[in-house]
Amino acid sequence: MMRAVVTGGAGFLGSHLVDRLVKEGHSAVIIDNLITGSLENIAHWKGDSRVVFIEANVSSFLDVPGEVDYVFHFASPASPLDFVRFPIPVLKAGALGTHNTLGLAKAKGAKYFLASTSEVYGDPLVSPQPETYWGNVNSIGPRGVYDEAKRFAEAMTMAYHRFHGVDTHIVRFFNTYGPRMRLDDGRVVPNFVSQALKGEPLTIYGDGKQTRSFGYYADIIEGVYRLAMSNFHEPVNLGTHDEFTILDFAKLVIKISGSSSQLSFHDPLPDDPRQRRPDLTRAREILNWQAKVSLEDGLRQTMESFQRSIGAAAKS
């Protein structure tokens, strides 16, 4: 049994990671400043001694009393809307937050896990994107605060591994979705699903021909856990090979939801990647991992969760 610190543990993916860790017999210390996380995501652990919540900002000095076996750094606003609303906190979470959490891992003799992103590839000129691709990033664009924060975080993580000998791991997520995403998240899945459930027009930026590959959270957390338990230290992509245009994805959401929503086209977003599809060779060969949940099945489960959230919001 290990004691793990999970920053961003009240967020979408972080809270699911906490669930998995406890299921495997471990205990978790959640650190979250709730800028985008929610106590609702971890309410089921209230009163359980295996899970401790600390409201704190990872961009400030961190000290966790007692032994720590693993540090999972999942803290950061992660949607395009967040990049506009919280540009400085995004940069700090990737830079200062990574430095502070690596310092904690080094001080405690703990293993370290960085949640990175496919955004490090920017608007890629290569498809599918292997981990060896260096990317095509606009460092001064509106998405640059997130892209460059994560690129710096990866560099810092590898520096601590090489110079200080910290046992580190890095994952790059590709469009992960599922229950516990915020309704106002701003990413395409919660946008389309919430709009369809409300009968509102689905907002498409640009011509809708840009592509994404969507990974359901349960598959992704399985990959995270396998990587965390591995001896591999370089970045690993997690996502799916299935590539959908935004236009086709919108039509699928309308079909599954049975909505009467129409499509509403708007000007393209700055630096919006035209293509997103991971090369999953490393995940398959090193982790013996592959996604199992189809997009339709994952969307149905996500819609059920969003429907409950929308209903609860309407009653309050």
Image (spheres, rainbow, N blue to C red):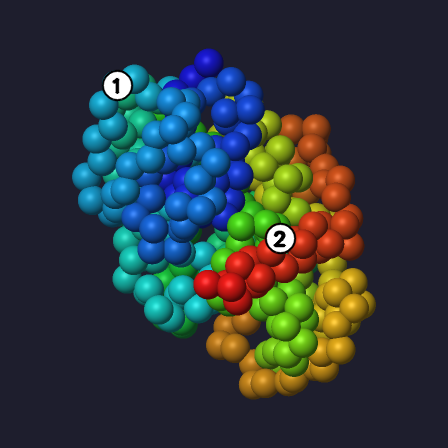
Q: What amino acid type is highlighted by mark number 2?
A: Ser
From this view, report whether residue 51 is shown above or below residue 10: above
Q: Is residue 59 visible?
A: yes
From this view, report whether residue 155 is shown above or below residue 72: below
Q: Position of residue 206 (x, y in %)?
A: 62, 81
Dot 1 alpha-carbon crowd within 10 angstroms: few under 14, some 14 to 19, many 20 or more = few
Which residue position holds label 1? 66
Res 252 → quadrant: bottom right
Question: Could you tell me which residue is drawn at 33 percent across and 38 percent down?
Answer: 31
Q: Secondary structure at mark 1?
A: loop
Q: Position of residue 207 (x, y in %)?
A: 67, 81
Left or right: residue 260 versus residue 204 is: right
Mark closer to the chain start, 2 or 1: 1
Front label number (2 vs 1):
2
Which residue position holds label 2? 305
Q: Position of residue 190 (x, y in %)?
A: 58, 63
Question: Could you tell me which residue is drawn at 65 percent across and 36 percent down?
Answer: 283
Q: What amino acid type is highlighted by mark number 1?
A: Gly
Front residue (pair 284, 189) = 189
Q: Secondary structure at mark 2?
A: helix
Seen as rendered, the residue at the extreme left is 61
Question: Could you tell me which residue is drawn at 55 percent across and 24 percent down?
Answer: 23
